[in-house]
Image (cartoon, rainbow, N blue to C red):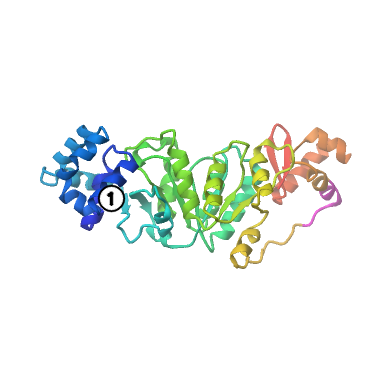
Amino acid sequence: MKLTPEEKAYLWLNSFPLDLKEKQKLLLSAGNSADLVRKFSEFRRLLIDFQKESVYNTMRETLTDGGAYFRSLVEELEKRGIIPVTLASPEYPEELKTLRDAPLVLYAKGELGLLRERKFTVVGSRRTPPAAIKTGTDISKAISKSFAIVTGFADGGDGAAIEGGMQAGKVICVLASGFSALPQGKLPLLNEVAQKGLLLSPYPMKTGTRAFSYEYRNKILAALGEGTLVISAGEKSGALITAKYAKKAGKPLFALPYSLGNALGEGCNALIQGGAYLTQTAGDILSRFGLETERNEQPIPPLSEEEERALNVLRERSEWHISELSEKTQIPVFKLTAILSSLEVKGLVAKIGGNRYEPV
């Protein structure tokens, strides 16, 4: 791993338990990262003011050990296939440099070239209904021909963005912890994203998830994308934090619409009321950037009279129990089951459990 003196200094500084503001103050006092290392003994008083004298002593020791500490730091990253991208690295995204609290180092695993591509953020809550997951996946797949999809790593809406983006190999997942604190149950998917796209963490490798980690991660998501699509969001969903930062940065905001009374989409409807673009297809996003939508090569599937009747009733609200639908359409349940299965195969209906269905 070849690093410049400035990159080495950022990586060294970021490995210690100091707040980002404290690290920034040290850098400001020194003038640049390399001079901070060269003149580090001059900053003892500043770290005492931070009540971090013990951290100063540790940092000082690592600068007098013949480079052993730094070598072990680099070796551990190399062993895990993690590439440090510092503020002094050419790969560092320009979009993040505008943040007052830009991470000093991004820890990356995968295709670094995606950081230089146009990027678009897609997020959603963990509790995303099946129809919205399908729509979000389809939109992410379509716009990934023009943008790298930026998202988090939660189930639900983020999962839809990952699935859609990975089909084109253009997905960037931003993590809310360091690489050694990731959930073991998600390692197969994490490895797949690293192979096909890019995993990115603003935290040193051994940093666990903390109370403020998600908000900071969401701020980075909003900063990276040229715009943000919210697939799903309840009244207090974390996806709304990403939307807040995107709006604050003056970036276009998009949201899927939900029927009235659907708690899983209250946040999306509120965003639309507040000026976000109502979004149903990839074209609703691409057109805002002056990009053309590829023609859908899939023909609209032919529907029988009863399929059309069932679908029209389904679209009257967000979800139906099969018994309610049977009563409304005057189609017996035993026959309606087959009709709904056919509509599922055609991608027009989603079964959401408990004999309940919703339109796609």
Residue at x 19% of width, y 53% of height: 35
**Which residue is painted at 68% across and 54% down in the image?**
280
Task: Please indicate, yes or no, whether residue 308 appears anywhere in the rendered image.
Answer: yes
Taking depth in this image into account, of 258 and 188 the one nearest to the observer is 258
Magenta range: 302-309
Q: Does residue 253 appear to the left or right of 179 in the view shown?
A: right
Choose between 6 and 115: the one closer to the eye. 6
Expressed as whole percent of the image width and height from the top left, the position of residue 64 reads: 11, 43
Q: Is residue 79 left or right of residue 299?
A: left
* Residue 9: percent from left, percent from top: 23, 51
Amino acid carrying mark 1 in the image: Leu
Residue 233: image x %, image y %? 61, 41
Task: Kindly identify the residue that appears in the image at 70 percent across and 31 percent down.
Answer: 354
Q: Is residue 308 magenta?
A: yes
Q: Which residue is rendered at x = 39% and y = 39% of the image?
A: 177
Q: Majority secondary structure of the magenta segment? A: helix
Report the front residue among 335 and 32: 32
Q: Secondary structure at mark 1?
A: helix
Image quarter hosting the N terminus: bottom left
Residue farthest along the right direction in this orientation: 330
Q: Is residue 111 magenta?
A: no
* Residue 204 visible in image: no
Q: Quadrant of residue 212?
A: top left
Residue 278 spot, x, y in % from top left: 68, 53
Disc 1 crowd, CA 10 A, few/some/many (<14, 14-19, 20+):
few
> Which residue in the structure is indicated by mark 1?
28
